[in-house]
Amino acid sequence: MADEGQRGARLRVVLVEDDEPIRRRLAELLAGWQEAVLVAECGTLADALQAVEREKLDLLVTDLKLPDGNGIEVIKVLRRTQPGAEAMVISVMTDERTVLDAIEAGATGYLLKDADSIDLIEAITDLMAGRSPISSRIARVLVRRLSDSNDSAVSEPVPGRPALTPREMDILWGVAKGFTYAELAERLEMSRQTVPVHIRNIYRKLQASNRSEAVFEAARLGLIRL
């Protein structure tokens, strides 16, 4: 029983959102989730930086456009001071530069604010399990940007391109589009339990550790494009 209690330790979360009604809604959602404890909710960059420096965290959930700066700065501080913690962006911003900057800073999840409450909790669960939840629109931004860069940079096949099986290519496309494991299993008519096995093989071949890295690398190598 003690081992189960240890595994069931609640996630320590800091929430950063300047819009008070949205922050209150998200705070209530997180506070009511039995798997998490909300240790701080912040409406400014300054407050967020103080919280990250003061609190021991498992997860940062942050907006980007704040009244006194950009939430990307909080992600950078978190990565430097608490490298074991995760960072998830929840934003309305979908421009390429912002998305790429957030992921390069260390965000391993990027949701749009139109995601409903159930999507948020499922996304956090995926994130803490080592996956990278990304809204489908954000995945398209990443793939399109990297495909365009690949087109302008090289026209020949990339040396050493990993060999993915047809099934792995199907799953890779689903990963890029932001499908969940259950959605992949249903669309590809395969067992839900075999999806993670294929994804681990894809990550290994692409030398990626999460969804966003796999999408980046696959687009860079010309394996996928929109």
Image (tube, grey):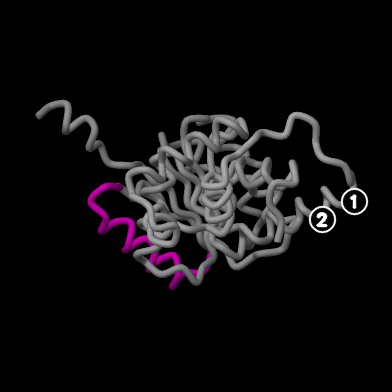
Q: Quadrant of the C terminus?
A: bottom right
Q: What amino acid is labelled 1 in the image?
A: Ser
Q: Residues within 10 Å of mark 1 (few under 14, many from 20)?
A: few
Task: Give the left or right position of residue 39, taking residue 4 as reference.
Answer: right
**Left or right: 209 in relation to 76:** left
Question: What amino acid is found at the position of numbered circle 2 in the picture?
Answer: Asp
Is most of the magenta stretch helix, strand or loop? helix
Residue 122 drawn at (x, y percent): 36, 56
Tell me the residue that label 2 is attached to: 148
Question: Residue at point 21% right, 30% down?
Answer: 6
Q: Which residue is mark 1?
A: 152
Position of the N terminus, as image quadrant, is top left
Q: Residue at x 55, y 30 (%)?
A: 204
Q: Position of residue 71 (x, y in %)?
A: 61, 52
Q: Of all residues shown, which one is farthest toward the front? A: 166
Q: Residue at x 90, y 51 (%)?
A: 152
Is 158 placed above or below 35 here? above
- Residue 134 in magenta stretch: no
Above or below 215: residue 111: below
The residue lying furthest to the top in this view is 3
Residue 30 in percent (x, y) is at 33, 57
Residues under numbered marks 1 and 2 in contact, where contact means CB atoms less than 8 Å apart:
yes
Q: Which residues are magenta?
A: 18-36
Q: Distance of mark 1 from mark 2, alpha carbons? A: 6 Å
Left or right of 93? Residue 48 is: left
The x and y percentages for residue 131 are 46, 43
Is 22 or 89 nearer to us in this picture? 89
Mark 1 falls on what kind of element?
Answer: helix
- Badge 2 crowding class, 10 Å Cα cut-off, few under 14, some 14 to 19, many 20 or more, is some
Q: Is residue 22 magenta?
A: yes
